[in-house]
Image: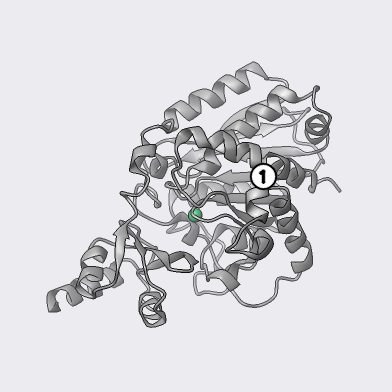
Amino acid sequence: MKKLAVLFALLIVTSLQAKIVEESFYIQTDDQKTFEMLKSRPELTIDHIEKGGFELYGPKGLGEFLDNNNIPHFSMKIAGMKARGQYPSPEEIEKELRSVTNAYPEITSMFSIGKSVKGRDLWVIKLSNNVKENDSRPEFKYIANMHGDEIVGREMMVRLIKDLAQNYGKDPQITNLLDRVQIYIMPSMNPDGAAASSRGNAKYVDLNRDFPDHTTSDNKDVTDGRQLETQAVMNWQKTRNFVLSANFHGGAEVANYPWDTAAEKFPKEALVKEFCLEYAGLTPYMSASTSFKNGITNGYAWYEVNGGMQDWSIKYRNDLQITIEVSNTKWPEYTKVDYYYKENKAALLRFIERAIP
Ligand SMILES: [Zn+2]
């Protein structure tokens, strides 16, 4: 017990800079004291709180710590293990993106905004009827899979890219979108995590806790000391002028609006709430949620996130962003992915339309 306490004290020191996610567990308890104790430990990350439990992430030794404290838990690595092998690899995703952009060179382009820790390209697809130029039309962005083990968003983005490319000039709504908006889609911000089925990147860092945060001491808008994937997004956003965006997660089914990091009311709360109500309203299983009224939530009211991408985008880049939690199951059977895309499609298209002034 004593040895373990020392081990944990050491881990706290080494992980103060970044949220390390080497071990992941689902904690099965509603006990408030246990929750508060875990929440108070700076090296741990709590996510997706619901009735009956929550997710808990931390450095090596976390499982042993939970065992020793008799906290009911099970490993998140094991859940959904069977389905993981059914999903494409980052390299297969890259191939698929390349084949779409090769087939539609007039309206699509594919470029990398940087490299992951393991040297994988961080691909972005741009779609527009004037794709080779940057013009004055509004810039819109979707980013998925920043948590490597939340994979359904990535699959939805690949399907959306294909749908937009294949139906330009055929479907009036899609045609209008590409005529009036410059659309950027990044299916996977964390390909290393996706390949390893892990939340963090190859350095076990939680990318959605790695951005500058205006409410904490880590509030400088600098890339020093951050992960390569975070740096790539930060640098890219400096060169663009996104007006509206969403980022996709998994492990819950809800549309989440800012702030995530503080209780203070977001100045445009009525508008972002309306976006979320509309997104969930157009996504039948989301609006039917029994966990979230109308399928939406304020981020902070659900649980606090420091260093998240959503709040950084808004505060530091004036890019209005909401967060979509796509599926309760992080790795559903692969055949179920088409269902999620079908259910979300109207909402995905409508949200892009919202960028049109
Ligand atoms: Zn996530």
Say which residue appears at 24% left-offset and 63% top-offset.
63
Say which residue appears at 36% left-offset and 67% top-offset.
28
- In percent of width and height, residue 352 lies at 74, 44
Q: Is residue 93 left or right of residue 135?
A: left
Look at the image and tell me in which quarter the N terminus lies: bottom left
Residue 123 visible? no
Instruction: Classify mark 1 as within 8 Å of ligand 1 or not, answering yes or no.
Output: no
| 242 or 38: nearer the viewer | 38
Question: According to the image, what is the colour scheme of the structure?
Answer: one colour
Residue 212 vertical placement versus 140 (above, below): below
Residue 244 vertical placement versus 94 (above, below): below
- In percent of width and height, residue 22 lies at 30, 56
Counting every numbered tag in the picture gives 1
The single residue placed furthest to the bottom in the displayed view is 33
Residue 157 visible? yes
Q: What element carries label 1?
A: strand
Residue indicated by mark 1: 141
**Amino acid of disc 1:** Lys
Say which residue appears at 53% left-offset and 24% top-offset.
96
Q: Is residue 214 left or right of residue 192?
A: right
Q: In this view, does 212 lie to the left or right of 288?
A: left
Within 10 Å of disc 1 (Cα), the crowding (few <14, some 14-19, many 20+) is many
Instruction: Name which quarter of the figure residue 267 lies in.
Output: bottom right
- In percent of width and height, residue 77 lies at 32, 50
The single residue placed furthest to the top in the displayed view is 103
Q: In this view, does 71 lie to the left or right of 17?
A: left
| 235 or 138: nearer the viewer | 138
- In percent of width and height, residue 205 lies at 38, 56
The single residue placed furthest to the right in the displayed view is 357
Say which residue appears at 64% left-offset and 27% top-offset.
162
